[in-house]
Amino acid sequence: MRKIFIFSFVLACMALFLPARAQNVGIKTNILYDAALSPNLGVEIGLAPRWTLDISGNVNAWTVDNRKWKHWLVQPEARYWLCERFQGNFFGLHLLGGQYNVGNIGRLPDFLGSHFSNLKDHRYQGWGAGAGIAYGHAWVLGKHWNLEAEIGIGWIYTRYDVYPCATCGTKQASNKVHNYVGPTKAALNLVYLF
């Protein structure tokens, strides 16, 4: 987990030293995360005529009505554009890593082997790391603005502790493992290019 964070940080620092030319760097926000009140930011850097590196991250530190959906996530992705970078279709290969603390959330269905219905009566605290593939499309809105849609699937390995309720209790289980296979990325990004 720490290695993924350090790797992502180094890539972001490298981006600061690349020359910023027209259509070489983009700053973005995922509107889907914004709608879920999860602040997020992404930077995409042109590496070659058809290759870019996207580094996105988000955080949610809120507890509302004793419901926890706290997390942070970093997701670097290498993208291959079928036409020119920052326009048209692309394929991506991404990594992801982060930590979470979730609980006291009801009415969620179980999905692809993950028992989200347990979040009503239990709190889960842990970390996860994984990888996936993605497909997306970018629409040019203007000289500096794009709208980008992307969906990805992959695998996430996670280790977590279980507590009996959202705010109290002694650990019921420690260092549990879960392997998730399914959607790993969903984005509707508003992008500013410079």
Image: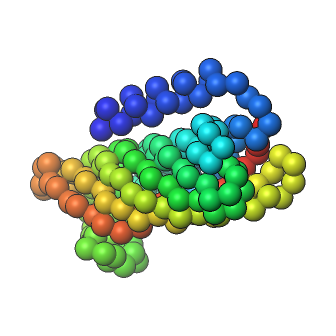
Q: Is residue 110 left or right of residue 170?
A: right
Tell me what residue is drawn at x 63 percent, y 63 percent. Answer: 89
- Name the quadrant of the N terminus: top left
Tell me what residue is drawn at x 30 percent, y 56 percent. Answer: 156
- Name the quadrant of the C terminus: top right
Tell me what residue is drawn at x 64 percent, y 25 percent. Answer: 18
Tell me what residue is drawn at x 22 percent, y 61 percent. Answer: 179
The extreme right residue here reads: 143
Residue 171 visible somewhere in the drawing? no
Residue 157 is situated, as x and y percent measured from the top left of the image, at 25, 54
Residue 72 is situated, as x and y percent measured from the top left of the image, at 44, 44
Q: Is residue 134 left or right of residue 5?
A: right
The extreme top residue here reads: 17
Up/down of 181 relative to 177, above or below: below
Residue 45 visible somewhere in the drawing? yes
Residue 2 is situated, as x and y percent measured from the top left of the image, at 31, 32
